[in-house]
Every structure is written in C-alpha cells, then in structure tokens.
Image (cartoon, grey):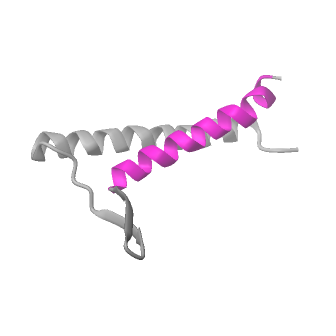
Amino acid sequence: PGICLSAWSEVLDVYQRRILGGAIGNMIDRAYHGHVIDYVLLHAGSYSFAIFNLADAALTVGVCVILVANLFFQNKAEG
C-alpha cells in the first residue's frame, strides 16, 4: 500500500517547479524594483509577523514538502 514511486516523482516535480517559480518571481522583483515587494502581512492583535509575497510562499511550501518527502519517504522509495 501507499503511493507508488511515479506518483511521488510527479508530486516532487510539482514542488520543484514551485521553488523555481518562487525564485524567478523574486528575481523579477529585484530586477524591476531593486528589491522584493512583500504584500502579505499576518498579525495577531498588535503583534505583526510573517511579511511575505506569493513567491516566498511558493518557495517555502516547496522546500518543506520536499524535505518532508525526503525525510520520511526516501528510504521506502529506495528499498
């Protein structure tokens, strides 16, 4: 049981593309504006935190999914 190797390969490919897309998005911002424009601000009460943009979110989610996949599923795929 479980997800077959080709399905994992497709999932990882999607998240690798998110990482690449996020990096390219931030590079475009830097090229046009000289800095990355962040437009999402999360806050709880008077405490503000997590200022980011869509490219940052794509990078972060992509890296986290690939890390978790490698940590927990790499051994199963090899053996």
Front position in the image: 33 or 8 = 33
Query: Which residue is painted at 42% across and 52% down in the image?
Result: 57
Q: Place residue 39 in its image quadrant.
A: bottom left
Where residue 7 appears, as percent x and y from the top left, is 68, 41
Query: On the rendered structure, is 66 left or right of 23?
Result: right
In this view of the protein, which residue sits in the foreground, 22 or 13? 22
**Residue 15 placement, left or right of 23:** right
Residue at the front extreme? 46
**In the figure, 28 relative to 74: above or below?**
below
Q: Give the range drawn in magenta.
A: 53-78
- Asked if the stretch drawn in magenta spans residue 18, the answer is no
- Which quadrant is home to the N terminus? top right
x then y, percent, for residue 22:
36, 44
Question: Is the magenta region chiefly helix, strand or loop?
Answer: helix
Could you say where residue 63 lies in the image, as x and y percent from the top left? 51, 39
- Where residue 26 appears, x then y in whole percent? 27, 43
Give the tally of numbered discs: 0
Q: In which quarter of the image is residue 59?
A: top left
Q: Which residue is drawn at 37% across and 74% down?
A: 46
Name the residue located 46 percent from the left edge and 46 percent from the top edge: 60
Q: Which residue lies furthest to the top in this view?
A: 78
